[in-house]
Amino acid sequence: MGITRRVWVHHRTDDNERSKAQIAIVGASGLRSVGKIVIKELIARLKPQLLLELYSYGLPGVYYGPSYLAPPSAAGVEIGRGGIVELPGVRFYLLKKRDIIIVDGYQAYNPPNQYLLADKVTDLLRDFHVKRLFSLGAQVIEEGIRCCATDPRLLTEMQAYGIKRTNVDRFIGFSGLVTAMGHNKGIEGVCLFACTSQNAADPEYPDYTAASELLVKLNEILQLEVDTSILEAKSRVESKLREEAMREEEKRAMREKREREQEETRGYI
């Protein structure tokens, strides 16, 4: 029996036909989870209305490696609060007072499914009459908030907010693909990148500092006035944990050095 349905939509409200928005904000799991953190914070603070959920056979329940690099994965479900199971999916929210769509994205497990998902997402954004899309991510090369865009005019516009053009030549994964495909459907796009650092042990380990800086800039551009104090508090906690880990690592290195010196001393007796 062949697969006849690969992407499908579950509407959570009857208002979808009448819903319109000029702006969309898109983020998904990625480098240090920066874009995902900002999207989750927007949803938590602004309480937008959940419009619909987009599901696909290309969305795994777990990845064995960074999700944005299409690593090996396995089918499964997410377990939410109260032990409720949910299919992994892309969720569309509407901030009614500002006519903004917030897209909580998801990385598909391979390029064909990633394209299929991005194509459907941009079709829906077009149906909602979105004209401009802000896509969120991170990079490790340049300091500050950087950007790229679908039109030079948008790069000039971002300069007014102190955002320089990035020299990074790739935006891997869902959010970058949605931006480019949206452009082909009449939606102009700006990609905003926060500066983060690599975590070799866990590339998606949350960087709350970078997420907070990105949210501050998004607040300025869209006049959202989202409180960033929660992210700043999490950033301070993470900073303290890193400092403690560094101190422990220094202590371990000193112990090993003393042990080596003792071994060498015994060797001369």
Image (cartoon, rainbow, N blue to C red):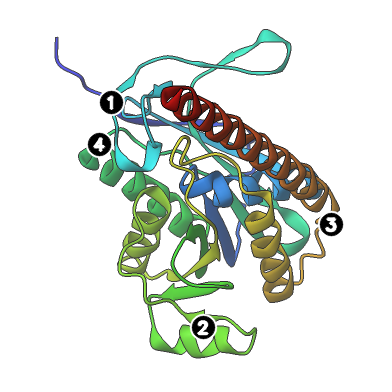
Q: Label 1 belongs to which residue?
A: 72
> How many labels were placed on the picture?
4
**Dot 3: few (<14), some (14–19), or many (≥20) neighbours within 10 Å?**
some
**What number is the disc on residue 110?**
4
**Dot 1: few (<14), some (14–19), or many (≥20) neighbours within 10 Å?**
some
In the picture as drawn, the residue positioned furthest to the left comes out as 1
Q: Label 3 belongs to which residue?
A: 227
* Left or right side of 26 for 97: right
Q: Position of residue 185 (x, y in %)?
A: 34, 65
Q: Earlier in the sequence, mark 4 or mark 2?
A: 4
- The reply to whether the C-beta atoms of the residues labelled 4 and 1 are less than 8 Å apart is no
Residue at 76% x, 72% y: name it: 223
Residue in front for this viewpoint, 210 or 132: 210
Residue at 51% x, 83% y: name it: 164
- The reply to whether the C-beta atoms of the residues labelled 3 and 4 are less than 8 Å apart is no
Q: Earlier in the sequence, mark 4 or mark 1?
A: 1
Q: CA distance from mark 4 to mark 2?
A: 31 Å
Q: Quadrant of the N terminus?
A: top left
Residue at 51% x, 65% y: name it: 193
Residue in front for this viewpoint, 42 or 261: 261
Q: Earlier in the sequence, mark 3 or mark 2?
A: 2
Q: Label 2 belongs to which residue?
A: 164
**Which label sits in the foreground, 4 or 2?**
2
Q: Is residue 124 visible?
A: yes
Q: Earlier in the sequence, mark 1 or mark 2?
A: 1
